[in-house]
Every structure is written in C-alpha cells, then in structure tokens.
Image (spheres, coloured by chain):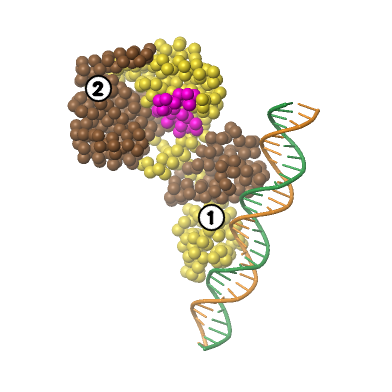
Chain colours: A brown, B yellow, C green, D orange
Amino acid sequence: MASRLVLRIQERYQRLTAGEQKLAQLILDRQDDILTHSATEIAEMAGVSKATAARFFQHLGYADFNEVKLQAREERNRTEPYGYSVTRSEQVALGRTIGAHLELELKNLTKTFEEMRSDKVRQAAELIGAAPKVWVLGLGVEEGVARYARLVFSRLRHSVMILGINQGSWAEDLAMTGPKDVLLLVTLPPHQPILKPILSHAATSRLNIITITDRNSMLEAQRYSNVVLPCHVASFALGPSHTTILSTVRLLALTYAAHAGRSAQQRAEIISAIHEELGDL
Amino acid sequence: MASRLVLRIQERYQRLTAGEQKLAQLILDRQDDILTHSATEIAEMAGVSKATAARFFQHLGYADFNEVKLQAREERNRTEPYGYSVTRSEQVALGRTIGAHLELELKNLTKTFEEMRSDKVRQAAELIGAAPKVWVLGLGVEEGVARYARLVFSRLRHSVMILGINQGSWAEDLAMTGPKDVLLLVTLPPHQPILKPILSHAATSRLNIITITDRNSMLEAQRYSNVVLPCHVASFALGPSHTTILSTVRLLALTYAAHAGRSAQQRAEIISAIHEELGDL
DNA sequence: GCAACAATGAAACTATTGTTTCACAATTAT
DNA sequence: ATAATTGTGAAACAATAGTTTCATTGTTGC
C-alpha cells in the first residue's frame, strides 16, 4: 500500500500539533480510509474539528483535500490493479535477538560455501586475470557491495571500474567495454529491469559475465553468465541479507589474488604506500 | 467479492434502460469505484447525466446514493478487515581456500555477536529513532558499506544521508547537521586522517555518534562515540574483512526496525511499492 | 401522422462537504 | 504576571454532490 501522504506524515510526525497527530495516527493506522471517507468523517473519527483536518492537509503541502483524494486514488490504481486483492499479511516479526541474527547469518554462510564449487570460483578468477578491464555493476542496494568489490579488486589489479557510476552514463560506459572484459555483476531480487538491456549489450560485446546472486535467481543468471556464484541470502526482514554476498566477493578476491600471485601482491603494497604518502594512518 | 449492489444489478440488468445499463456495466466492471468515487463521477464515466445516475440507484431500491456508499463500505469492512497491506515476504530458502575462508568468516561472526552487548545495540537503535537526521559516513573501502547502510536505513526512516557524498562538500554537509542528529560511522584501519576534523566538528554540533569498527580500534572510538559496536575482522589477506561489519549494520537495522515498529514497516512497504511503480520487477 | 408514454439532460434546488474567519484557549516567551 | 504566539472549534461561507423538476426527445401503438 503506497502513499506519498504516509511518507510525508512520517517525516513530519514529531513536528505536528496534538490534533494533527491524532489525524496522522488515524491515517497511518487505516490508510485505506483516505480513499473512501470524506475529510469530515476522518476528522470525526480522529476526534478533531473539520477545520483542523482541512488545515492538516494544507500543512502537509496539499492545496486542498481533493488533491489528497486524487493522489491516493492514483496510487491505488498503480499498486492495486485488481482492487482489493488477496492479503496474506502475516506480520513479519521484525524484532529478533542477536542470537537469531547470528544463527541465520552463520547458516547462510555455511550453506553457501559448502555448496560453492571451487572450480567455478577458480574459473571466475581466471576470467578476471585475463580481462583487459573489469567492470563492476550493482544496482540499488547492491551498489554498495559493487563499490566495495571495485575497491578490493582495484587493489589487486588495474582497470577495475564501476559501470554507470553516473546515472545517465550507461551508453558511454558500455561503449568502452571490449571483448574479454569481465563484468562482475552483483544482483539480488528484486532485479531491476534496466539490467536486461545492459546484459544484452554485454553479450554482443563478448563480455565475460560473472554473476554473484542468490540461489533462486541462479538458473536465470546462468542464461547470460559465464560463471554464477550463488549465495544463500535468507533473512527474516529488510530484504535479502547481503552478508554472504560480500563474503563471496572477498572469496573471489582472495582466489584472484592467489591466482595472480606476485603481481597482485606488489600492487597492494604500492597502493598502501601511496596511502601512507597521502597521510593515511 | 459479491456485493448486494452487484447482485441487484445482475438480477435486473435486462430490464434496465439504455443509460442505466451503461452505469450498470461500469459498476460491474469496476466494482471498487463505488467506494471511492462520487455519483457524479460515476455518471460522467458512464457518459450519462447526474440525474440518470441518481434515478438509477433509486430504481435499484436504495433511498439515495449515500445508502449505496455505506452498504459498499460495510461489505468491504467485512471482507477486508485489514485492508490490503502487501507484505513482501522474502523467499526463505533456508576447496581448501573456500574452507579456510568460511572458517575465518564464521569465527569472526560468532565471536562478534557473542560479545556484542544487546543493550548497546538497543541504545544505538534508540538514538537513531530520536534523531531528526541520520548521517552515514564511511571512507575508502568503507564507503561501500556506508552506502549499503544508508539504503537499508532509508527504507526504514526518512532523512538518512551519506555524509560528504561529493568529495568536496564536507563543509556544506556538516553545516546541515544539528543536535540529536546521529552520525553512523563505519571505520576500519587504516583510519583516514580526515576523520579527525569531521569528528571534532560533530562533537561541537552535539551529534550522537554510533561507530562500527574493529575491536582494536574500539577504545579509541569510545572517546568520541556515544555507542561503539566492535567487530572481529580477521582476514589472511586483503586487509580486514568487512563481512562482519556488514552483518552488524544489518543487525542494527533489524533492531531499529523492531524499535520503530509499524512505522518502519509501513515505510518499507511504501518504498517497495514505489519501486514497483518505477517499473522494478 | 399523432397521441401517449418512457427516457433523458439541463437546470433549479437541496444537502453535504470542505475552507476560512474569528474568538478564545493553551502554550511559550518576556 | 503579562504579552505574543500558536492551536483549536464554532460558525460563516464557498464549493460540490445529489435530487428533483421540467422541457425535450424519441419510441410505441393506433
């Protein structure tokens, strides 16, 4: 259930007056009522006057209540094309102890690496070794992990770059890719649609694609990738866990470092020397 | 979803006049619209006059349109007690280098979370809950983790920002910080010297600092932080491992989500709906 | 063709909803 | 305390929704 209105309310909740908070609470609790009830009714339910209600929506930045109603409607039409569809709203228990978190993360890691095929990892490392350039791509939440990967790998070899670091620059970046380049892709569901065109371009450019993803996306990933490294990403909330993903990036980096041997080590040394020069501690 | 209204319409559909059939068809097609739209709007959509619409409902046996609206509402409340909150339930799936890597990562994670004090985590979550704005800072390799943290937290609350996202903009960003704001700092050795002036400014601005760092840097971090969450980051190459760091970020996010409760969950749902709007898969 | 009648929309009318004004209460600053 | 500011509901007001009236159109039966 989407509503800009709710976002607005959450943002300013603390700064709202008493009466407005009553209204806000009511709306947060029963978001659908905006669609079906009049402002007068909402005011009554919240126990405030019509006047306060009218002002409330104005303070939130709407010109009038009609604007609120229309926006809510529009959003519903986008999110709920079939009206009041099935709700299996099982309250996700967000609160868990450290122990439960640890247990789940351990399980993810253990399963992932027990199932991980060392030949695939080695193959990936070799591809990276043979690549003129290495491009790293992670969209959305995975961008952080992608940046991490770039930094780790750029300590081990030259020409490791984030793909499309500037929003609009896909075309420019893609134009710079060449055959035997490696694309290291980090992607978890929900996979973003823009990925498709990028991958299809990558295919024509003869890029070698190494994909780090979750086990469920593995089969699909295999269709466009040379190597897939699948991870367990179970989590009880907040979307899939990236912990194992990050760990797999490290494993790949370690394997590559071993594969590249001395040259990677030298490079790491040089870089840390540069860091010292720059004054890092 | 069988409403009385629909049943009644179906019963007499054949006997309805031309204009009334237009209305009837519209309502059969889009039953929910009765809940959200005015009679005038329905008339317009069906291409008949308000008068015809008014008569239509009377012919169906209702005293006035209000009766129609109230009945529809009542029926919905019976069938849809909690509206339609779409809970995105996650898919619960629950060589030598690989083995060694796994072993080390497991040890890091286990030690870290066995030693982690739940009161500190809770305290951190509360600070975040009370903060007008949350700033996330990670330099160098930690930048990726910082970006990850920002995204995870911005799904749970408003006003979560990366500090100094543009290289030169420290001063501008720091000027925007205020008391009770939280600075979530991710830092591992080698700690970068620019950190010092930033932290000293943070102190004068009365920012609350939550630091995620390694155990060895813990003591130093305590001097400038309100809460320190120390991690084991042992690694046989490539510098410290960020796996545990990332996992700690997740733990903090989970704890915060539990602390913030419904509002965080709602926000997460809204954002995933916006993603869908934008066309994410 | 032409009554008789049903269906319809425009417009008058009524009821309701939403906004603004204003007086007063509550809070904050002085 | 006292003044200034802010939040509030009652009521005046404006806008809109819904109903009814009425003139017009089109159809049916003769």
Distance CA(mark 2)–CA(mark 1): 62 Å
- Residue B149 in view here: no
Q: Chain of mark 1?
A: B
Q: Is residue B54 visible?
A: yes
Q: Nearer the viewer, residue B171 or A184?
A: B171
Q: Residue at x 49, y 24 (%)?
A: B174
State the image coordinates of residue B50 (x, y, percent, origin top left): 56, 64
Find numbered disc 2 in the image and state the secondary structure of the residue it sits on: loop
Q: Which residues are magenta?
A: B145-174
Residue under mark 2: which chain is it in? A
Residue at x 61% of width, y 42% of height: A56
Where's residue A51, x and y in %?
66, 45
According to the image, label 1 marks what residue?
B37
Residue A22 in the figure: left or right of residue D4: left
Q: Nearer the viewer, residue B14 or A212?
A: A212
Asked if labels 2 and 1 share a chain, the reply is no
Q: Amino acid at mark 1?
A: His
Q: Name the side, left or right, on which A55 lies relative to A192.
A: right
Local SS, label 1 = loop
